[in-house]
Image (cartoon, helix red, strand yellow):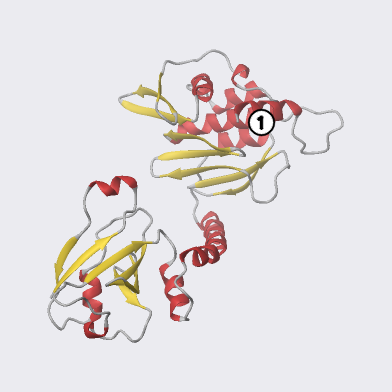
Amino acid sequence: MLIVVDRSSVAMGDDVEPHRRTVEVPDGAPLEEVLRRTAPDASVCGGSTWITSWNDVPVAVHSSGWGTGRFWDERYRTVADLPATADGALPVVFHRYWAQLDADWLLERLRAGEPLDRRALQERWVPIAAQRRKHALRERERTHPGRLLDAATVAALTALGARVDLHTDRVCRFSVGGASGPEASWRAELHDTMTLVWTPDGRCGSLRPIALAQPWLVALVGAAVSGRGADALPAPAVGASVRRSPSLWTVTREVDGRQELAQLPDEAHAQWFRRVLGRSVQEVAAAYGAGPPATPGAGPGARPRGLLRWWRSRR
């Protein structure tokens, strides 16, 4: 039996090649074999979940973790039970990408009779996913000895008023000055080879290796508690190349045949990062002081007025 197999795209670059193909399946093959042979030909970092349709009728959930699909309707026991095609036409299997929605959870919901409403199901899944991620991070922090930031960086951040909330080998979350709640508004995360730095106003750098991200993070926190930006640091200590692309600025330099790279949101941050480059976290922390300056009439943990003016000027 010949079956036409197609799927939706998982990213813009995925549209370069067509996804439509024809697969041959032995006559009389069980449905499990049909689903296995017609699985979507896509590899997605972090896994993928799909809704599989047979002749435009959604019938199964496919998970890259399972390596196959599973029906949620017990009416489908053989190929003959599946929705029919027009006379003479080949059956069409289409896989619609549902990103990383948990396939086991989704299948359970559909088998319980819930409608196949993507928006409603995703809204229900978001808080569950957040809770699972929180639990997984806490467990990793407890059981895995590795840490993303080194001891010198943590000491520098602490001296500048940061309070570390969670620290694993892949993520560090913290708040500054006690103004934030238990879920910190600052974090650094490792994604593949890049370390992403997030401030209260959003992402403020993608850097490689981690040794670049650490003094940059200290500089950002130092600016937040002191109200000073690049002017706190002397002129650049080392040479580097700065170039602009459509949505970011990139700073690079070669060290012992290895490229160091930082992608920043605008030219001001790129030029500021050039002053940070080549300096230790202790040097950067010292440039911004050991902690938040006192603000007359402000309670504990209040942000200095200079900080607010500086952040607003960067938005």
In the rendered view, would you say 14 is above or below 234?
below
Q: Secondary structure at mark 1?
A: helix
Residue pointed to by mark 1: 224
In the rendered view, would you say 153 is above or below 173?
above
| Front residue of 150 and 278 | 278
Residue at screen point 42% across, 15% down: 239
Residue at screen point 49% across, 15% down: 237
| Front residue of 93 and 267 | 93
Residue at the front extreme of this rendering: 87
Please give left or right for residue 7 compared with residue 242 in the image: left
Q: Does the rendering let one see residue 290?
A: no
Q: Does the rendering let one see residue 95?
A: yes
Write down the quadrant of residue 179 in the picture: top right
Q: Residues within 10 Å of mark 1 (few under 14, many from 20)?
A: many
| Front residue of 75 and 311 | 75
Write down the quadrant of residue 93 in the picture: bottom left
Residue 142 location (% of width, % of height): 55, 57
Q: Amino acid at mark 1?
A: Ala
Residue 233 location (% of width, % of height): 59, 18
In the rendered view, would you say 103 is above or below 300?
below
Residue 99 location (% of width, % of height): 40, 58
**Quadrant of the frame with the N terminus:** bottom left
Residue 62 location (% of width, % of height): 33, 69
**Quadrant of the frame with the C terminus:** top right
Residue at the right extreme of this rendering: 297
How many numbered discs, if any? 1
Residue at screen point 43% across, 45% down: 191
